[in-house]
Amino acid sequence: MAGIHITDIEAAINWWRHRQPSPDGVTLSAPLRALAQVYALLVYYHETLCDEHGMPAAARQAWLDWYASTPDAPCIAICSTTQGDAVCKGCGRTFDEVQHWPSMTPADKRQTWHRITREGTAWRFNRYADRVRPDAPPPPLGAR
């Protein structure tokens, strides 16, 4: 089952709270209400994954809007799967994940992101972490 992790629902809620803050501290925007309902059910049933295709349409659209604001691929342009590695040293994805990334669903992509982040062994998390920081200055001309 392609599932959306509860932490992604939380991230989407926080993204929408920043985009459409409550005018009175109580009232929620429609996307927030939709996501809050899904989040509450996950908590109530002690679940960590929500079925991507079973979400109410408004919640799924709110989540997809947040998802569109996130980086798509974990690639840092150092791909060792092209050299025969089963798992890329640069991004941490498996050969199959790299090959099928364009056809994967958003939930499948997020599951991959969660796994490689949890493992934290790819170069994107240590050796070349500065490549993925949005505020990182460009490298000096001699370093390119």
Image (cartoon, rainbow, N blue to C red):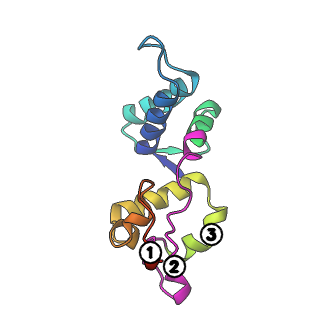
* Outermost residue toward the bottom in this view: 83
The label nearer to you, 3 versus 2, is 2
Of residues 142 and 4, which is closer to you in this image? 142
Indicate which disc, 1 or 2, sits on the residue closer to the N terminus: 2
Question: In what element is the residue under mark 3?
Answer: helix
Indicate which disc, 1 or 3, sits on the residue closer to the N terminus: 1
User: Bounds of the magenta span?
Assistant: 65-93
How far apart are labels 1 and 3 at the CA level?
A: 17 Å
Q: Mark 1 near mark 3, Cβ–Cβ under 8 Å?
A: no
Q: Residue at x 56, y 74 (%)?
A: 96
Q: Which residue is mark 3?
A: 100
Which quarter of the figure is the N terminus placed in? Answer: bottom right
- Can residue 88 be seen here? no
Q: Which residue is mark 2?
A: 79
Does 71 sit left or right of 103 as displayed? left
Of residues 35 and 45, which is closer to you in this image? 35
Across and down, in percent, residue 2 comes to 55, 53
How far apart are labels 1 and 2 at the CA level?
A: 6 Å
What amino acid is found at the position of numbered circle 1 in the picture? Gly
- Can residue 91 be seen here? yes
Q: Mark 1 near mark 2, Cβ–Cβ under 8 Å?
A: yes
